[in-house]
Amino acid sequence: MQRSLVGSEMCIRDSSGTAVHRLHVRDLMYIEVSGHRCTYHTCDHLVEARNSLSRLSEELAPYHFMMCNSCYLVNPHYIRSIKGHTVTVGPDELTISQPKKKAFMLQFNEWISRGGA
């Protein structure tokens, strides 16, 4: 998979290798990772590609993406609610794992205290 992050835009070659997608980071609600298979959840569609969570986490850190579970990187701009061990991101409910909950909540509260930007 070829991928590049330029400014706030990602170019991703999908897992079939037949298409390249341009995604704006601001449109990414969250990324779901299973092994090296990633599903990029945007406001209006899904893109599947190969990548690792550690690489994505590093690349998206400047945009305040947060790990709520060992398989989800969440864009805090799309968090609608947090209740117990569930975070609602856009229309989807994601599980916050017990080991990640404290760090996730700290990151989210710091992001809010900085004005959510």
Image (cartoon, helix red, strand yellow):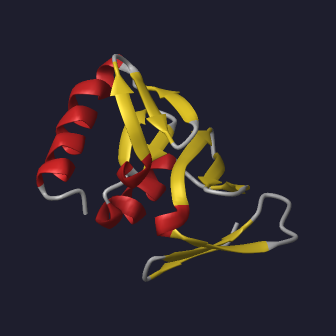
Quadrant in which the N terminus is drawn: bottom right
Instruction: Looking at the picture, tell me which residue is in the foreground, 98 or 93.
Output: 93
Left or right: 93 in relation to 11: left
Instruction: Looking at the picture, tell me which residue is in the foreground, 66 or 15.
Output: 66
Left or right: 108 in relation to 88: left
Left or right: 40 in relation to 77: right
Q: Is residue 98 above or below residue 55?
A: above
Q: In percent of the image, x 67 and y 72: which residue is there?
A: 2
Residue 73, horizontal then vertical, whole percent: 45, 45
Q: Is residue 20 above or below residue 107?
A: below
Quadrant in which the C terminus is drawn: bottom left
Instruction: Looking at the picture, tell me which residue is in the foreground, 85 or 72.
Output: 85
Residue 81, horizontal then vertical, whole percent: 37, 33
Q: In percent of the image, x 62 and y 53: which residue is there?
A: 40
Q: Is residue 44 above or below residue 87?
A: below
Quadrant of res 34 = top right
Quadrant of res 48 = bottom right
Q: Is residue 41 above or below residue 9?
A: above
Residue 65, horizontal then vertical, whole percent: 37, 53
Q: In percent of the image, x 66 and y 48: which residue is there?
A: 39
Q: Residue furthest bottom?
A: 6
Left or right: 56 in relation to 105: right
Q: In percent of the image, x 53 and y 43: which residue is there?
A: 90
Quadrant of res 67 = top left
Residue 91, horizontal then vertical, whole percent: 58, 38
- The number of discs equals 0
Instruction: Looking at the picture, tell me which residue is in the foreground, 23 or 1.
Output: 23
